[in-house]
Structure formats: structure tokens, C-alpha cells
Image (spheres, rainbow, N blue to C red):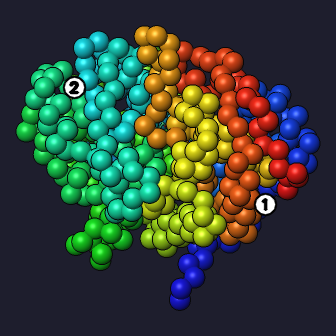
């Protein structure tokens, strides 16, 4: 059987609202050309993020009803802890309301001025939490990962030579933890190989540095290992996941990704002292140690979601459905990051609109055009998100200019994906008409969430939208 079908059927539906091109022009202007500021009712297909946008299963919804809402010692916490420990093997499992809360706690304890925290590529909230603590966040992607058009199996890998150079150059004492993000979200949703996880772990431990996974998409990463890494073809995904975590001393996790829930996360570790300190911060900022800012029923949904995400028919469908969109775009000549990652297809804005310079935010121009043309909401991952200014106030662009089409888990059908592929291809065919934007307002950190833009010239003047 060649066709991989959705391994579920639909019991409940949510109505979509269609808008016209002229309505969208008005709505986008009112949102200052930043789709984060649109009302989601005005979005037809929402590819802003795969985070917390999962459709939960009937079993998860019924698990919610079974939650034990006790403030302390909830049965739901112990079920959550048991499932997370079974998968990760870590001694201390500390629930948080989402991933960045786990990051905030970790880096407020191990970060601070003079400290350096390397990663294959830091996610935006990870980088922000490190920088807010006063520490420095360093990205060490391997060279292949920076070439969007190059096809390779594990473009998410960390460059271990650069890691050793960094440790020797700065001294291990300045590096309180080495992180590795699986899959590498910012680098195109590309997987990290087991060999790389093992190598980073060995280097970290040789210098006495703890090694943590940013584990948001651990299951998608494990499925890539099964499909691509020699020796793992017939190993069950759950065993692959357990091996991945076995090399680490802890992890941060956003359950809004591979937890298959709408909110939740955790911080886990083996170190007793660090865990005690983390729980003390948790109680001040999130909640008691057996709920961490969540309703206890949410912990039930996470426990069930973690079991479902390891279902290999789900993971095969998940990776295949993302690849299906990538294949359709490539057929239309649209430049994308190759190969497609686990949770998203990334358009390569530098090749999509080469006439728009980084200072005019080519990715944001495409994001706006996709909304105007077809009501599709996407997000720029380029110089809007990661650009910096030099001393003279000039933009230091990001290394890549990408647009992410993140696919929510178990939400859209194949015909939705066909519509997306058609719409993106139509905008691409009209690309000469696109022009850039300037920033009219920006916040000091994580500016992409609230930035306001002004178009330079006419944004996208195709005769008609969809
Ligand atoms: C989403 C994400 C986070 C942050 O998690 P939130 O739940 O959004 O706070 C951290 N790292 C990576 C790689 C992510 O994808």
C-alpha cells in the first residue's frame, strides 16, 4: 500500500470562516502587517505554529474528565510523572505550564552574566530566557544545516568540532549546560542523529558539563532516526526515544508539540540539588510541585498524548503529510528548505523573492502575500525574528530568511494541504509583484510577536485573491 492515510477518523468538526481579498486587505492593515496581530476568526488555514494547536483524541478528552484536581499530591500528577519517567528515565519531573516556563526556571538557576550556553540552534524563547538571565546563547549548527537547498539526513546536528573549540576557548567553567534541540525547530525542523546526540553527550561529560535536550519534538526526531539512521530500522520508536534521553542529564519540554496537548510542559533532570532549587522557583512562579501552573486534568491529557505520539502509524503519517506538502511545492518550483522537516515546511525567502533585500524583510513580504491571497497565516523565521542591530544601528540579518508553514497535529486534511500548495505556488508565480516592509514599532525582546510594519510600495497586487 503506497498511500499513507490519516490514522484517525473525525468525530467533531470546527467551522472555517471564509473572507474576501478586500476584507483581508483591511484586516491585515489593521494588524499592522503582522499576522500575529490578526484575529484567528479571520484566518482560513492557520499555519502560524504547530504549538498547542493539536487536535486531542477522544481518549485525551475523556482523560480530562478523570483528572484529580487536588492541589497537592494529585493522582493525575503521579500518572503524568510515571509516563514521562518511563520515556525519559529522568529522576525529577517538574511540570510547567509550557516550555518557556521550564526554560525560565533552568536559566534563572544556571544562567547569568559571563555564562555561555551552546545549542545546535536556540529556539527564540530559549535564546530570550538565556539572554534575559545575562548569559550568552550560542548557536553551533553544522554547516549543512545552513544550506537550505542541500538534502541531507540529519541537518539538525550540532557541529561537535565547534563545540569543542568553544569549550576550550572559553573554558568549561563558563558553560553551565550544553543544550541540543530535537528536532532543530529554528534550523528548519531538521532531525538530529543518535550519533550526534551521543557525540555531544560524550564531549559535555568529558568536560564535566551537564547535557540537556530541548525535547519538544522528541518523537518526530526518533521517527526520523528510525527511517534514516543505519541500525535503527527495526528498533521500536519508544526504544529509540529512551536511548536519546539516556545520553542526557535533563530536558526542557513543551508538551504543546509532541505531548499532543494544547498546553503544558516540564523540566526534568537527574541532579538532586538543581531539582530542589528548580522546585523552589516553581512554587514561587508557577505553582506547587505536583501541578506547576496547570490544571491537574491537563497532566492526564499529556500522559495520554505521550502514549499516542509514540504510535508509529501516527508518526509515519505525520512525517509523510509534511513531506507531501513539500513535494507539491517543489513540483511547482517553489524554493523550500530540503528535505522537509518533521513539523513544518520552510519556504526559502532569499530564493523566493531575491529582489527584496534582508533590510526589507523578504520573509515578512511572503507572509503578508499568503494571507492576502488565500487567508493562510504563516510566520517569518528570519531577520524579523532573529535580526540584531550593530553599534551604528544597522540591521545584522539572520543567516537564513525563511517562512515557516507549521502543520498542526491531526488538524488539517489532505485537501486543505492541496489548497495550501496551490495558493503558495500562485503567490510564487506572482513573486515579481511582491515588495518589502519596514518596521514601524518593535519591542526590545522577541520583537516578532508584536512588531508593526509598513509596506514599502505595493505588497502584492495580483488581480484577485482566492
Ligand atoms: C515551542 C518551543 C519552545 C518553547 O515552548 P513553549 O511551550 O512555546 O513555551 C522551546 N523550544 C522549542 C524547540 C520549541 O519548539
Is residue 461 visible in the rendered image? The answer is: yes
* Percent of width and height locating residue 68: 55, 42
Q: Residue at x 67, y 17 (%)?
A: 441
Q: Which of labels 1 and 2 is toward the front?
A: 2
Crowd band around label 1 with a 10 angstrom C-alpha radius: few (<14), some (14–19), many (20+): few
In the image shown, does 288 or 249 lie closer to the viewer? 249
- For label 2, the residue is 176
Above or below 172: residue 249: below
Q: How many numbered marks, from 0 up?
A: 2
Residue found at x 91% / y 41%: 23
Where residue 384 sits: x, y (%)? Answer: 56, 30
Q: Quadrant of residue 271?
A: top left
Q: Residue at x 71, y 58 (%)?
A: 429
Mark 1 lies on residue? 13
Residue found at x 22% / y 72%: 231
| Quadrant for the C terminus in the image | bottom right
Could you tell me which secondary element the residue under label 1 belongs to?
loop
Q: Is residue 140 left or right of residue 454?
A: left
Q: Position of residue 316 (x, y in %)?
A: 48, 71
Amino acid at each position: 500500500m503506497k498511500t499513507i492515510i490519516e490514522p484517525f477518523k473525525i468525530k467533531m468538526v470546527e467551522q472555517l470562516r471564509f473572507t474576501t481579498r478586500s476584507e483581508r486587505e483591511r484586516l491585515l492593515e489593521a494588524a499592522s502587517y503582522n499576522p500575529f496581530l490578526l484575529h484567528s476568526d479571520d484566518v482560513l488555514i492557520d499555519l502560524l505554529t504547530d504549538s498547542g494547536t493539536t487536535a486531542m483524541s477522544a481518549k485525551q478528552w475523556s482523560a480530562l474528565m478523570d483528572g484529580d484536581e487536588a492541589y497537592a499530591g494529585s493522582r493525575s500528577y503521579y500518572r503524568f510523572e510515571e509516563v514521562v519517567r518511563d520515556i525519559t528515565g529522568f529522576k525529577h519531573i517538574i511540570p510547567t505550564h509550557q516550555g518557556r516556563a521550564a526554560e525560565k526556571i533552568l536559566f534563572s538557576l544556571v544562567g547569568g552574566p559571563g555564562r555561555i550556553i551552546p545549542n545546535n540552534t536556540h529556539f527564540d524563547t530559549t535564546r530570550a530566557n538565556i539572554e534575559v538571565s545575562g548569559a550568552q546563547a550560542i548557536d553551533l549548527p553544522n554547516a549543512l544545516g545552513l544550506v537550505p537547498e542541500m538534502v541531507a539526513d540529519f541537518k539538525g546536528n550540532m557541529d561537535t568540532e565547534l563545540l569543542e573549540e568553544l569549550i576550550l576557548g572559553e573554558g568549561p567553567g563558563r558553560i553551565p549546560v550544553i543544550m541540543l534541540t530535537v528536532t532543530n525547530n529554528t534550523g528548519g525542523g531538521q532531525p538530529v542523529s543518535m550519533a550526534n546526540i551521543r557525540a555531544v553527550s560524550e564531549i559535555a561529560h568529558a568536560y564535566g558539563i551537564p547535557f540537556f535536550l530541548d525535547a519538544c519534538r522528541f518523537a518526530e526526531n526518533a521517527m526520523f532516526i528510525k527511517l534514516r539512521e543505519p541500525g535503527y530500522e527495526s528498533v521500536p520508536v519508544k526504544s529509540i526515544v529512551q536511548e536519546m534521553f539516556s545520553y542526557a542529564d535533563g530536558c526542557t519540554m513543551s508538551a504543546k508539540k509532541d505531548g499532543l496537548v494544547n498546553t503544558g510542559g516540564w523540566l526534568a533532570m537527574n541532579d538532586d540539588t538543581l531539582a530542589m532549587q528548580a522546585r523552589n522557583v516553581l512554587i514561587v512562579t508557577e505553582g506547587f510541585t505536583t501541578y506547576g501552573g496547570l490544571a491537574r486534568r491537563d497532566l492526564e491529557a499529556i500522559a495520554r498524548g505521550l502514549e499516542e505520539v509514540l504510535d508509529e502509524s501516527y508518526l509515519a503519517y505525520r512525517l509523510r503529510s509534511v513531506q507531501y506538502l513539500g513535494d507539491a511545492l517543489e513540483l511547482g518550483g517553489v524554493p523550500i528548505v530540503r528535505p522537509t522537516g518533521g513539523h513544518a515546511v520552510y519556504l526559502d525567502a532569499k530564493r523566493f523573492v531575491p529582489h527584496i533585500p534582508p533590510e526589507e524583510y523578504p520573509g515578512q513580504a511572503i507572509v503578508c502575500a499568503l494571507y492576502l491571497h488565500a487567508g493562510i497565516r504563516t510566520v517569518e523565521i528570519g531577520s524579523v525574528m532573529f535580526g540584531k542591530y550593530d553599534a551604528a544601528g544597522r540591521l545584522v540579518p539572520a543567516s537564513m530568511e525563511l517562512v515557516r508553514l507549521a502543520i498542526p497535529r491531526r488538524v488539517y486534511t489532505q485537501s486543505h494541504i492541496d489548497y495550501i500548495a496551490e495558493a503558495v505556488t500562485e503567490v510564487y508565480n506572482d513573486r515579481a509583484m511582491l515588495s518589502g516592509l519596514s518596521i514601524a514599532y518593535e519591542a526590545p525582546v522577541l520583537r516578532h510577536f508584536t512588531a508593526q510594519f509598513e509596506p514599502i510600495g505595493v505588497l502584492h497586487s495580483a488581480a484577485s485573491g482566492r
